[in-house]
Image (cartoon, rainbow, N blue to C red):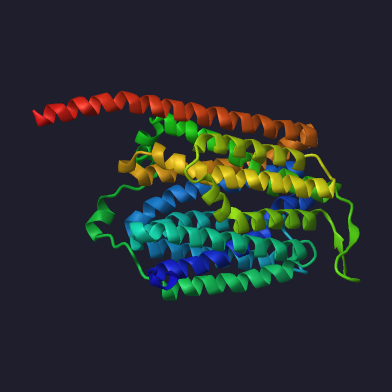
């Protein structure tokens, strides 16, 4: 069935696999990089700026994808990606190191990601059908998780000791991704010259297009609930990463036979993330079958709780076995809440404006990243136990807001149904 998908879809899955692997080799460890080169406060502020820049770029990226076409925005983004990696190689070489120029290159990468993602997502919808989308997204999800796992393994092993060589390899992979995008992907959306001229530029028309979405209170509450939960997940590559790197004393571990390796904070973080990814990859289909025909809300709320409690343990413990068990707990929670929340989200959004709603739903990830970066600053002041309590509070807030959103949506539906009945009766008469 994979061969039956549109060539653009297959190429995009390949390029997405490479892009995710590249980002997983470096971005989860940038908080540690900036903390080491500058300090934790600077690291948090810089990463928050990066998230904000990517969010603004994605707003423009989606808007321009409808003005100039999908492929053009993807190609521009890939060229920026290549340039940024070249800059990172230059200023993280044996001759010169500059965290500030490295940060500037990360901003370029943030803009490139903001250009590529909405254009590529729109392209996937352009060339797919209703019958093939479920299979397309499931394959893409699988490939992304596998690429993240491979990227984290390689990054965890090389980032601390062989950053320069790692960046050279990533630069070569980014060239491959650029070539595939330019040569193999075809344009899926053509805009007439008159449409390009009549569409206004600037932030105001973009913001105006989201006014209807913002007025939908149930959806906004549901989005805020999602932000509370995702804010916890993004702590892994920020506060939790820095805490493990600082507090885990490197020790030699024997694995098979006489094979030994040194386990430090970065490698432990990589192993825990790989564990989480493996559980997700191996057991997604099992959980999906289990929750079929069951009430979604209770499963989602239990998933939230397990997810928050697992991360709460990661916030303060240095006990390796306990950390491994905590990842199992949070992974089960993730498997429970992700599919149920997506299913409920599909019921909440207005089908007539699905594109705008799903674009706005990206705020869950972008603001979650922002809170993740902010966690570095807050965690430095309140410590691991304080952050653990904060994760539990965020979990409860996520449950309350999500529950309130569903209640308001149900109430809105009950009000609308009699009105629709009256309208239909009037039309029949």
Q: Nearer the viewer, residue 269 or 102?
A: 269
Q: Quadrant of residue 235?
A: top right
Outermost residue, left direction? 429
Residue under the image location 51 percent in, 42 percent down:
340
User: Would you place residue 404 above or below residue 228 in this image?
Assistant: above
Image quadrant in which the N terminus is located: bottom left
Q: Is residue 366 visible?
A: no
Percent from the top left, x then y, of residue 8? 40, 68
Percent from the top left, x then y, of residue 372? 65, 42
Residue under the image location 24 percent in, 25 percent down:
419
Image quadrant in which the C terminus is located: top left
Answer with left or right where residue 214 lies relative to residue 50: left
Residue under the image location 53 percent in, 29 percent down:
401
Answer with left or right where residue 54 lies relative to residue 33: left
Answer with left or right where residue 6 lies relative to residue 262: left
Residue under the image location 66 percent in, 58 percent down:
278
Answer with left or right where residue 120 lies relative to residue 429: right
Q: Is residue 236 visible?
A: yes
Q: Quadrant of residue 233?
A: top right
Q: Nearer the viewer, residue 208 or 249?
A: 249
Q: Nearer the viewer, residue 397 or 170?
A: 397
Percent from the top left, x then y, of residue 24? 64, 59
Percent from the top left, x then y, of residue 290? 55, 48
Q: Nearer the viewer, residue 368 or 125?
A: 125
């Amino acid at each position: 069935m994979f061969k039956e998908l549109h060539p653009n879809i297959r190429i995009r899955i390949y390029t997405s696999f490479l892009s995710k692997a590249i980002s997983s080799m470096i971005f989860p460890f940038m908080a540690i990089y900036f903390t080491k080169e500058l300090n934790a406060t600077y690291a948090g502020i810089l990463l928050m700026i990066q998230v904000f820049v990517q969010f603004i770029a994605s707003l423009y990226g989606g808007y321009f994808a409808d003005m100039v076409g999908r492929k053009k925005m993807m190609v521009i983004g890939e060229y920026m990606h290549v340039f940024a990696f070249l800059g990172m190689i230059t200023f993280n070489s044996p001759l010169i190191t500059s965290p500030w120029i490295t940060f500037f290159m990360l901003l370029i990468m943030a803009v490139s990601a903001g250009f590529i993602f909405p254009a590529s997502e729109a392209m996937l919808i352009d060339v797919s059908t209703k019958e093939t989308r479920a299979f397309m997204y499931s394959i893409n999800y699988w490939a992304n998780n596998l690429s993240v796992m491979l990227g984290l393994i390689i990054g965890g092993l090389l980032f601390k000791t062989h950053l320069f060589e790692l960046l050279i390899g990533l630069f070569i992979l980014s060239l491959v991704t650029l070539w595939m995008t330019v040569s193999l992907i075809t344009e899926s959306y053509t805009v007439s010259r008159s449409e390009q001229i009549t569409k206004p530029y600037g932030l105001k028309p973009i913001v105006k297009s989201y006014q209807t979405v913002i007025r939908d209170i149930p959806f906004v509450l549901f989005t805020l609930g999602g932000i509370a939960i995702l804010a916890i997940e993004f702590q892994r590559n920020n506060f939790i990463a820095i805490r493990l790197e600082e507090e885990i004393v490197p020790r030699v571990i024997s694995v098979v036979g006489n094979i030994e390796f040194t386990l430090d904070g970065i490698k432990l973080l990589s192993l825990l993330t790989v564990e989480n990814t493996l559980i997700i990859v191996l057991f997604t289909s099992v959980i999906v079958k289990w929750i079929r025909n069951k009430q979604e809300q209770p499963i989602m709320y239990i998933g939230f709780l397990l997810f928050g409690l697992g991360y709460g343990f990661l916030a303060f413990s240095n006990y390796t076995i306990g950390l491994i068990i905590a990842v199992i707990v949070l992974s089960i929670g993730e498997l429970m809440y992700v599919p149920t929340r997506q299913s409920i989200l599909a019921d909440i959004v207005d089908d007539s404006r699905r594109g705008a709603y799903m674009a706005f739903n990206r705020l869950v990830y972008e603001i979650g990243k922002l809170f993740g970066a902010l966690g570095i600053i807050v965690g430095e002041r309140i410590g691991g136990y304080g952050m653990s309590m904060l994760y539990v509070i965020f979990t409860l807030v996520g449950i309350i807001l999500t529950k309130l959103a569903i209640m308001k949506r149900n109430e809105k539906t009950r009000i609308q149904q009699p009105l629709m009945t009256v309208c239909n009766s009037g039309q029949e008469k």
